[in-house]
Amino acid sequence: MAMSPQKSSLEGRDLRRSFGQGSMRSTALAGVSIDLYPGQFSLMMGPSGSGKSTLLAILSGLLRPDHGTVHSLGQNIWAMSERQAEGFRLRHVGFIFQGYNLFGAFNAVQQLELVGRWGMNMGYWEARKKARNILDMLGLSKKKHLRPAEMSGGEKQRVAIGRALMKEPELLFADEPTSALDWGTGEQVIELLRGAARERGATVLCVAHDSRIIPFADQVIHLEDGQLKGVVYPDGKSGRPDREDERSHSSKSVLPGGEDEGWNKGKLGGRLNRTA
């Protein structure tokens, strides 16, 4: 479904989620609202337990919120039936999980082929060619025949990333995609995610602790204690692609406390590095 560059592709409104019961109940999200746009690579950061993974799961349709709405590509995903939601994710959404979620019996090429053949209705040779090309880009040209048990953690992570890229999704969600990688490989992965946004107009949301990713992001979303604490635009732009009337907005204009809190562009890296 094609989206206008001026229209958000993903809208979350007043999202709330708690876990546990009674005195053991804890709040993961306390009323978060967020907009993401096509062609945008968004980075979400914050301390451990701040609600980052919970928010990503709710926005991607994997976890139902206690309260609030999510409109994805113009559709209210939490008003869908379970079957409708599964179909929507299959057609439009790609995931990169921390836990890899690879099939133990399949080698690297087959992991990607499966997505092409059953998720995109590709023919056998088309799916195999595309799978091989993506694995080559991820530096796995000599590992294509290996099964997950024969791979290192970093290799499994790259296969999981390749599987997500195979579908060329309109919405791409990544939870700590570089955590098991050295920075050289991690940087290549981030470039691929940013390329999915820049070149294909995908909406990409990445949860990470690594402050080295900040310069690659169109916007950096900071969560703390289940609340949205601020949004920084590292390039000084609004984060909304092709909105020329908002290009001149500075990061301090959208953050609590402005420059006095150290959120301005010049202090961005140090500030987020301390809080991530």
Image (cartoon, rainbow, N blue to C red):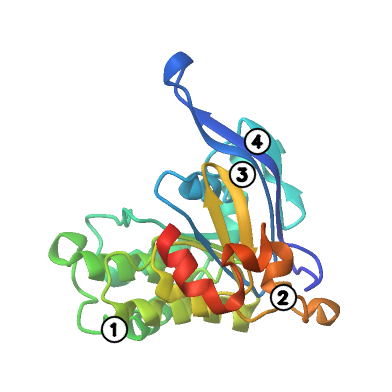
Q: CA distance from mark 3 to mark 4?
A: 6 Å
> In this rendering, would 151 be left or right of 180?
left
Q: Earlier in the sequence, mark 1 or mark 3?
A: 3
User: Tag 2: Cα neighbours inside 10 Å, few (<14), some, or many (≥20)?
Assistant: some
CB-based contact (under 8 Å), mark 3 and mark 4: yes
Residue 12 percent location from the top left of the image: 69, 48
Q: Give the structural element (helix, strand or loop) at label 3.
A: helix
Residue drawn at the location 33% of the way across and 53% of the way down: 101
Residue furthest to the front: 260
User: Measured along the vertical axis of the image, is residue 203 above or below residue 141?
Assistant: above
What kind of residue is marked 1? Gly
Q: Which residue is mark 1?
A: 139
Of badges 1 and 3, the one in the foreground is 1
Residue type marked 2 = Ser
> What residue sits right under mark 4 in the picture?
81
Contact between marks 2 and 3 (CB within 8 A): the answer is no
The residue under the point 38% across, 82% down is 188
Observer-nearest of 120 and 194: 194
| Residue at mark 1 to residue at mark 4: CA–CA distance | 40 Å
**Amino acid tagged 4:** Ser
Q: Residues within 10 Å of mark 4 (few under 14, many from 20)?
A: few
Looking at the figure, which quarter contains the N terminus?
A: bottom right
Residue on which disc 2 sits: 250
In the image, which disc is placed on residue 85?
3
Q: Is residue 74 left or right of residue 266?
A: right
- Distance from disc 2 to disc 4, alpha carbons, whole Å, reads 41 Å
Q: Position of residue 31 (x, y in %)?
A: 66, 39
Furthest toward the top, the residue is 22
